[in-house]
Image: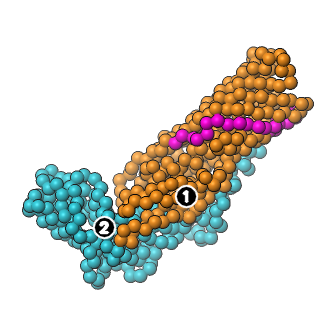
Chain colours: A cyan, B orange
Amino acid sequence: MRRMLLLTVLIALPLVTGCKKQLFHLTGTLNVSELFEVNDADGSYQAMETIQPADVNAELDIPDNAVITGVEIETLYFDVALQPGNQAASVSASAWVRPQNGVYVPAFQNITLPLVNGIVNINTLNPAAVAVLKAQLQAVLMQVGTVGPVDVRVELTANRAPVIADIELVVRGTVNYDACLEVPDWLTEGEKCDIEED
Amino acid sequence: MHKPIFIKLLSVLVILAVVAPVHAGEVEDFVSKYTGENGEGYMQPLADAFGASLNSGLYHDARISRVRIRLYVGMEAMMATVGPDQKTFKAKTENFSPEQTVEAPTLFGKNEPVTVTGTGGTVYTFPGGMNFKRLPIAVPQATIGGIAGTDLTVRWFATSSAKDLGDIKLMGWGVRHSLSQYMPLLPLVDIAAGYYSQSFKVGDIVDAKATLISLQASVTKTVLVVYGGVGFESSKLDVAYEHNEAGSEPVKIGFELEGKNKMRMTVGAGLNLPGINIHGEYNIGTQSVLSAGFGFRF
C-alpha cells in the first residue's frame, strides 16, 4: 500500500511542481509624507518641510530584482490627527512646492480642510506642482534628471481659533516596475524573463 | 525592501496537492493596490475557479456494493478553464478625483496595468493580472465502502512547510448511498446520491469551504464506465491578511468571496483495469472544470 501511495504521488508531481520565471509588469504604491505639528493659538500657521531623496528611497518597497519603468503621482492628501485643545473646526489650506534651486510653485490654494481625524483628499491640484513632485520621484527612483530635495511649504488659516493638530501632507505615488516571479508551469501566458539576476 | 507574506496563496492553492515547499508567486505585488470592493472583483475569479475545482472529481461511477467492501486510493487533478469574462471586472478609482470606472484586469487578466488621468495631471493605476490561462489543482483522494450500499470518500492533505504561511490543511469528506439497489427494474444503470464537504485552510490567511450535493448515474460495460450527474453546490473563499504599505501603518485586509457555481452537470468516462482505475470528466457550470484521475482499487 505504501508503495502505491508513493507511486501515486510521484506520478502526480510533474503536474503540480514545475515552476518557471516570468516577467510581470507590476505596480507599487509609494507614500511620501511630511508632518506639520500645528500648535497655533491665533489660528495662523506657516511652515516648511523638505522631502529628501532618502525619504523617497526609504518608502520604496518592491522586489530586489525589480526594474522601475515609470512613476506617477496619484494624489495628495492630508492625514489629520487632532490634539487636545484644538478649537478650530476647519482651516483654509495652501501649499507650495519648490525643487532644488527653483521657485515655489503653488500646489493648491485656499482649500477648506475640515479638522476631523482622518484622511482628507485634495481634489484641486496644480499640474505644475504635480510635475515637480513627479520629477523628483523619477529622479530618485529612475535616475532621470537631477536628484535633489523638494521643499513643501504649507499655510493654514483658521478664524482666530486655536489649531492644535498633527497634520501630515502625503504625496501618494505609483511605481510601475517589471519583475521576474517564479510561477507554476501551465499557469500563465506570461512574458519571458529577461531581467538579469544579481 | 521587504517581501511580505500575503498570498503566496495562489501558488498554495495551485499546488495544494502533495508538495511543499511552495514556490510563491508574490500575489501581493498584484493585489496590494486594492483594499476594498475592487479587491473582491479582482480576486473573484480565483474563488470561482477554486471552489468549482474542489467540487470536481469526487466520484467516477455510481456503483456501490451492498456487501463487498472496496477501497480506492488515488489522485485527482482538476483544471478550471479561464474564460474571457473572468479576465476583467468593473473597477472604480479609490480616493481619486474625479472618480472613474473602467474595465480593469482581474487576477486572471492581462498583465498590463490600466491607467486613468485625474485632476492636475494625477494618474490612477489599476494593476494588471497574472495572465492566467487555467487554474490546475490536484488532491489525493480515497474511497472506502460497500456497506449497505454506502461509501465514504476522503480528501486530506496537511503540511506546515510552506514559508511564512502557517499550516496548510485540506480536509474533505463525502458520503453517498446507492439508490439503484431500491430500483430492481433498472438493472443496467447504477444510481447514487452523495453529499460532500471540504475545507481548505492556510494558516490564518485563507479559509475556503466547498459543499456539493449530487445525484449520480453510471453504466458499466466490461471495463468501461460511463458516468454523469447533476449537482448543487456552494463554495466560499475568505482571505484575510495584514497589508504593509510603505509609509503607512499596517492595515488588516479581508475578502469574503462566494463562488458563483450553484449547479453543475458532470459527464465522464473511466476504465476499470485490473487493480487500477483511470477516468476523466467534464463539469459544466457557470465555472466549468476538466478533471482526471487515477487510482488503485483493492
Say whether residue A67 is left or right of residue B176. Answer: left
Q: Is residue B276 magenta?
A: yes
Query: How many residues crowd around disc 1 within 10 Å: few (fewer than 14), some, or many (20 or more)?
Result: many
Q: Residue at x 62, y 45 (%)?
A: B49
Q: Residue at x 72, y 44 (%)?
A: B290
Q: Is residue B260 magenta?
A: yes
Q: Is residue A117 above or below residue A55?
A: above
From the top left corner, tell me how far across and down residue A94 is, in percent: 22, 69
- Residue A3 seen in the figure: no
Residue type marked 2:
Thr
From the top left corner, tell me how far across and down residue A176 is, in percent: 49, 67
- The residue wearing badge 1 is B105
- The residue wearing badge 2 is A124
Q: Residue at x 59, y 61 (%)?
A: B110
Chain ID at mark 2: A
Q: In whole angstroms, how far apart are the C-alphas of marks 1 and 2? A: 29 Å
Quadrant where the N terminus of chain A is found in the figure: top right
1 or 2: mark nearer the eye = 2
Say whether residue B75 is left or right of residue B124. Answer: right
Query: What segment carries the magenta color?
Result: B257-279
Q: Nearer the viewer, residue B269 or A173?
A: B269
Query: How many residues crowd around disc 2 within 10 Å: few (fewer than 14), some, or many (20 or more)?
Result: some
Q: Nearer the viewer, residue B208 or A124?
A: A124
- Residue A189 seen in the figure: yes
